[in-house]
Amino acid sequence: MSRFTIALLMASFCLAQNAQPGRAEIKLDPQVLARYVGVYRMPSGADMAITLENGQLLSKLGNQNAIPIFAESETMFFPKVVDAQLEFGGKDAQGRPTTVAVLDNEGVTGLYHSSEGKEGDAVWGTRGRWVALSGRLGGEDVTLTILDDPKNPGAPTYWHARGYGLFAANPLGQKVFSNGKEELNLKLAAGASATFHYLVVVSSGRFEAPRVEALFKEIAK
């Protein structure tokens, strides 16, 4: 991994969430885990699907990839890839939980914005000319923006944009993100190479879509 990539990941994690602290994992009977399987509507309007595969609970928010979650009590679970907790509450007539609350780091302010007008979780797995991550850092408004060069293969690119800070362009994932409807099929002869260009901008001040779009038009010339 290059120093540039590490720096970019550090910046996006600062705007999103801190690293996962140590938590005590406990084992629950598979019959107990099965109670949590279902689809839960979150306050944001997105659906969180909880599934059970080979004794492992998985959480999938919207169109993001499913991630494993682990029990620290019979009602509290946590992922290991992000500092957050899921608390299951309420019960129906069969004893199944009816709600799930996401408890994450207090003060997290990061919000994704795409050139296509999408925000937050809706940005994940969609195409866009650019994506910006805005928030507050040290009491200051900060925006981290990645702009795709329209001359890149497969442009406009698809985007990784997760709440825990994974923020990256994915120009080669067309087949996965489109459920097989699209495929870049980029092939290189032996010894050949391909170059992808992106502009990364870290700026102070609040996010302003017109300013980002104007910058994109400049680099697209």
Image (spheres, helix red, strand yellow):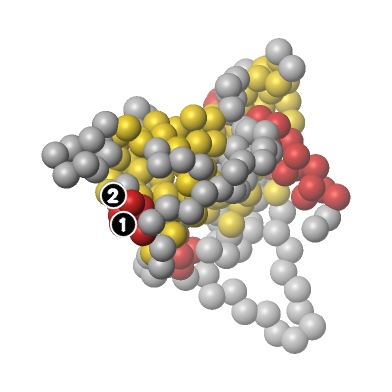
Q: Is residue 2 above or below residue 109?
A: below
* Residue hosting label 2: 35
Q: Which residue is mark 1?
A: 31
In the image, farthest residue toward the top: 139
Can you say whether 104 is above or below 179 in the image? above
| Near-viewer residue (95 or 129) | 95
Q: Is residue 22 above or below residue 176?
A: above
At label 2, the amino acid type is Arg
Q: Which x, y percent locates residue 40?
A: 29, 40
Name the residue at 83% across, 55% down. 2
For the residues labelled 2 and 1, the Cα–Cα distance comes to: 7 Å
Q: Tell me the residue at 58%/22% (across/down).
A: 106
Residue 96 locus on image (x, y percent):
24, 43
Residue 8: percent from left, percent from top: 75, 42
Nearest the eye: 174 or 95: 95
Q: Secondary structure at mark 2?
A: loop
Whether residue 188 is visible here, answered yes or no, is yes
Residue under the point 60% across and 48% down: 81
